[in-house]
Image (spheres, grey):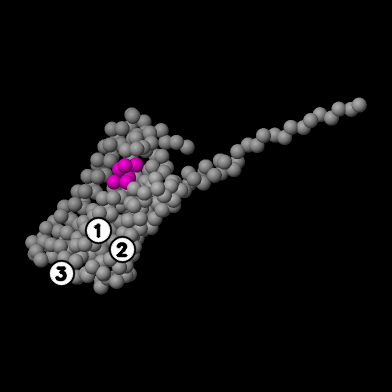
């Protein structure tokens, strides 16, 4: 099955619904988040590194989610009819690299945070953190998994297509680890806007992954049910 795009007649409706949905989400979450952040910085300017680290962490998560979603859209070919595959693949790769870079900054800022100081070893070694070591360690493992995936993009020709695809499955572990890390160790996870961010991202990835698995299963069933040519019988001749 190949997606051939939506009807042009529904374009205005679709864009309108998207604009309304984004407006509702942004209107309900952004003012609250920015207001809380501004008040906190004014009240405690010495915690600027802590607030910046939290902000960069969310930006890294958004980039990771975007990369995973684009990867699933590519593998299911849902956007082939609406965009050039080379451009979409480049965006998928760039989002992964940007997310990795932001995650590195997110971790490095912990060394400047006086609220809960981290040493370089505690930042680098999984489960060595002084704060919630298990869930911080899960986030560290997610970072290293994402590092391998980003490296595989640039080593694709050397390692081959099969190895690249195998390494690419680490993306899902990185996403699960980053989500668990944010929910369990993030100081903002108790707020409604942060909680819905993680839940919305999880639902989107789960839906696309289920769709991808269903397509693969349907293709396997189609190949298994392919009709076979009937056996021909030769007529017997009597003498």
**Most foreground residue, 172 or 42:** 172
| Helix, strand or loop for disc 2 | helix
| Helix, strand or loop for disc 3 | loop
In the image, farthest residue toward the front: 158
| Helix, strand or loop for disc 1 | helix
In the rendered image, the vertical position of residue 20 relative to residue 4, given as above or below? below
Residue 114 badge: 3
| Residue at x-position 33% and y-position 60% | 144
Residue 104 badge: 1
Which residue range is magenta in the image?
89-94
Which is more N-terminal, label 3 or label 1? 1
**Most foreground residue, 183 or 92:** 92
Q: Position of residue 209 (x, y in %)?
A: 42, 49
Q: Are marks 1 and 3 in contact (CB under 8 Å)?
A: no
Give yes or no for residue 90 being in the magenta stretch.
yes
| Residue at x-position 19% and y-position 70% | 117
Q: Left or right? Give the position of 76 relative to 67.
A: right
Mark-to-mark CA distance, 2 and 3 = 20 Å
Looking at the image, can residue 148 be seen? yes
Mark-to-mark CA distance, 1 and 3 = 18 Å
């Amino acid at each position: 099955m190949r997606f051939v795009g939506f009807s042009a007649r529904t374009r205005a409706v679709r864009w309108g619904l998207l604009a309304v949905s984004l407006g509702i989400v942004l209107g309900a979450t952004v003012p609250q988040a920015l207001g809380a952040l501004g008040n906190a910085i004014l009240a405690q300017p010495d915690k600027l590194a802590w607030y910046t680290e939290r902000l960069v962490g969310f930006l890294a998560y958004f980039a990771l989610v975007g990369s995973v979603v684009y990867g699933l859209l590519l593998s299911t070919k849902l956007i082939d009819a609406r965009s050039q595959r080379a451009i979409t693949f480049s965006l998928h790769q760039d989002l992964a690299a940007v997310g990795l870079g932001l995650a590195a900054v997110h971790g490095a800022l912990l060394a400047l945070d006086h609220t809960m100081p981290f040493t370089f070893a505690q930042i680098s070694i999984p489960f060595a953190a002084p704060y919630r070591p298990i869930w911080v360690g899960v986030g560290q493992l997610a970072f290293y998994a994402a590092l391998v995936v980003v490296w595989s993009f640039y080593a694709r020709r050397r390692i081959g297509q099969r190895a690249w695809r195998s390494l690419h499955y680490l993306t899902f572990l990185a996403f699960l680890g980053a989500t668990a890390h944010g929910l369990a160790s993030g100081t903002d996870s108790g707020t409604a806007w942060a909680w819905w961010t993680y839940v919305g991202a999880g639902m989107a990835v789960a839906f696309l992954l289920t769709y991808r698995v269903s397509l693969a299963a349907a293709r396997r069933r189609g190949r298994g049910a392919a009709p076979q040519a009937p056996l021909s019988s030769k007529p017997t001749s009597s003498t």
